[in-house]
Image (spheres, rainbow, N blue to C red):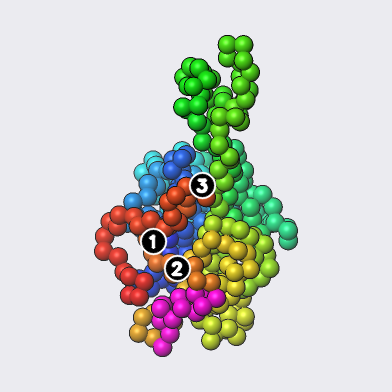
Amino acid sequence: MQVTFLGTSSGVPTRQRNVSSLAVRLPQRSELWLLDCGEATQHQLLRSPLRVSQLRRIFITHMHGDHVFGLPGLLASLGMAGASTGLDLYGPPPLQNFVESALRFSSTRLSYPLRFHVNVPPPEGHVLFEDDDLVVDSRPLRHRIPASGFRIGQKPRAGRFDVEKARALGIPPGPLYGRLKKGETVSVGGRTIAGSSLCGPPRLGVSLVYATDTVFCDAAVDLARGADLLVHEATFAHRDGEMALQRLHSTTTMAAQVALAAGVGRLALTHFSPRYMPGQAIGPDDLLAEARAIFPATVMAKDFLTLELASKSDESGLERPRPEPFPQHSLTS
């Protein structure tokens, strides 16, 4: 699972940061998912190595413009390019009316179907999507309008199949290997062989949690518990905590407290107010330092940063640099 930040500013874009959108690439199924779709998200996709033709699902946290204004344009462009066979959209009840109204009043007809899924999670949360490999949970967060957080979790995978052991037992390569990998019991030469005896322990899947927009709340902690990566908004610096409480956004320290309480593997801060641009009294390095004082395993997201979530049984780390298609801004620029 690869996570690419397409927009990390709050409210309005800046020269360095676009507004909210997070791309989740699922290489094992050749799919791309989006979490939020702020203005100019389609431009960000064009500037990235991501393949828009793989876009299958879009999850919207809430209906504020910096999280949805890019959706009509992206959908229209996909239609004109013939780059989509259909999309599933998940979001609050107004989402369908917003999208269909924008398309209708702009006389835009799509060449592919849109499937809308209304997301109104109960306080304890619910499963929004599930298949054989992935499950998406959603919980209501605490913001000025109804807003939800998402957790994308990969289900445990079968343990590694010991080919050498299978050969030593005289099991011929072919369809039997596939059945044994699934843990089935097969008969070979009058012997009964359990697939579990040839497979290592199950490999735990990875999990990503996306929590924006919200002030600190227990729901975010519960949603993020034990996740590999928590992407959490940090609109304000710690000194502006009163403003954060008034506007129901989070500070850097609130995000770090969620990560600490939930026991996540890594925290990525996003959704920064433009008031903390470089050269101001408080800048990006200060925001990062505030969060790291509470939760050291914190990174500051920037547009086009890609993080890779590896299985807990793999030896690779969480973060792996990706080729950059054009000059990038550093975390402090």
Residue 133 in view (yes/no):
no
Looking at the image, which residue sits at the far front? Answer: 168
Asked whether 187 or 60 is in front, the reply is 187
Q: Residue at x 50, y 31 (%)?
A: 162
Asked whether 209 or 200 is in front, the reply is 200
Q: Residue at x 47, y 53 (%)?
A: 309
Q: Mark 2: which secondary structure?
A: strand
Q: Position of residue 84 (x, y in %)?
A: 43, 41
The range drawn in magenta is 281-294
Q: Residue at x 51, y 24 (%)?
A: 166
Instruction: Tell me the residue that label 1 is attached to.
Output: 305
Q: Of the residues under marks 2 and 3, which one precedes in the sequence?
A: 2
Q: Quadrant of residue 150?
A: bottom right
Q: Quadrant of residue 307?
A: bottom left
Is 322 part of what is drawn in magenta? Answer: no
Q: Are marks 2 and 3 in contact (CB under 8 Å)?
A: no
